[in-house]
Amino acid sequence: MDRREFVASLTAGGCAGMCVDLILYPLDTIKTRLQSQQGFFRAGGFRKIYAGVPSAAIGSFPNAAAFFVTYECSKSLLGSAGLLSAPHMAPVTHMFAASLGEVVACLIRVPAEVVKQRTQASPGSSTYHMLLSTLQQEGIRGLYRGYGSTVLREIPFSLVQFPLWEYLKTLWTQRQGHTLSAWQSAVCGAVAGAAAAFVTTPLDVAKTRIMLAKPGSTAASGNISLVLYEVWRSRGFSGLFAGTVPRVTLISTGGFIFLGAYDKVRRSILSQAS
């Protein structure tokens, strides 16, 4: 990847991330409250639906930019040499690249997500107050509570979403005989996002419980299997898929906006620079 492509990926990824996070924020709040241990209405219901939005606004650009720069660089490196350069290995290349992108992006995403979700589940508190409270009670480590569960959620998600997105784009391109437009790429992103969102919802439930857990509690230890077992025991199968509808809606719509905007902005930057 040359400097021009690096800048294009950085800018396009950041812009796409901010667009989707701010436009779809109310759905994210509803999803978090549905998954919280205290229940939807005790966590705030439909009140203060934009609680915690400053955290999302600050973290969305660098988070998405970090992911796409890592994704595009890894995809370029992995696909340029060795066994992974073969056309039939493209899905594996996309899986590896997406996984690496998530590991890097989560270093930025998790602190923003912790503050955001705690504010969403406690709408009486401000983002600043929740940040200070977390630092005072748990230190920097508190901001990274749930890092492992977030990575373990995001990697399976990306293993489904990005290879499926790239495959759908390739298939559509072959059928129509020319490169897809941005809106067609966005449709592929919506389908891929919906599929990935559904199958990874239990991991998202576990991640939410871990981030919202009180310090010292069983869930706060970050043991995903233990948290999932507790959810299944107390709320059954439906508890494992709590928030599925808003999550699938959020990520499907988000995939349309996110991946469509990314393709559009990236192509615009590259065409202007050439």
Image (cartoon, rainbow, N blue to C red):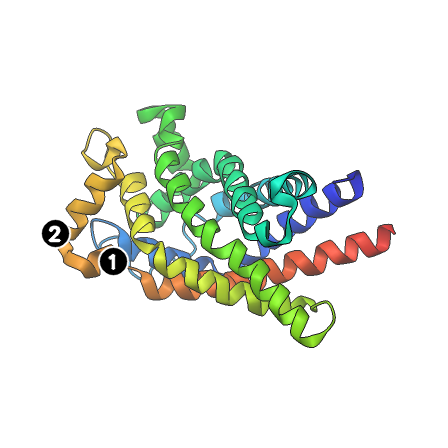
Q: Is residue 44 visible?
A: no
**Nearer the camera: disc 1 or disc 2:** 2
Q: Is residue 171 left or right of residue 269?
A: left
Question: Image point 83% across, 56% down: which residue?
Answer: 271
Q: Nearer the viewer, residue 158 or 272?
A: 158
Residue found farthest to the bottom: 176
Does the CB distance between marks 1 and 2 fall below 8 Å?
no
Q: Is residue 72 above or below residue 246?
A: above
In terms of secondary structure, where does tag 1 sit? Answer: loop
Q: CA distance from mark 1 to mark 2?
A: 16 Å
Q: Is residue 29 visible?
A: yes
Disc number placed over residue 234 in the picture, else none:
2
In the rendered image, residue 223, in percent from the top left (x then y), is placed at: 25, 35
Q: Residue shown at 40%/51% (left/top)?
A: 51
Assess disc 2: are there few (<14), some (14-19) or many (≥20) residues with their C-alpha within 10 Å of its C-alpha: few
Q: In which quadrant of the rendered view does residue 259 lie? A: bottom right
| Residue 191: image location, x then y, percent | 49, 67
Q: Which numbered marker is on residue 40? A: 1
Q: What residue type is disc 1 on?
A: Phe
* Left or right: 150 as drawn, with respect to 86: left
Mark 2: amino acid = Ser
* The N terminus, quarter of image: top right
Q: 35 or 239: nearer the eye? A: 239
> Which comes before the other along the chain, label 1 or label 2?
1
Q: Secondary structure at mark 2?
A: helix
Q: What crowding class fits label 1: few (fewer than 14 Cα within 10 Å), some (14-19), or many (20 or more)?
A: some
What residue is rendered at 54% in x and 57% in y? Answer: 20
Tell me residue 160's x, y (percent): 46, 55
Please name the residue shown 12% across and 52% down the image. 234
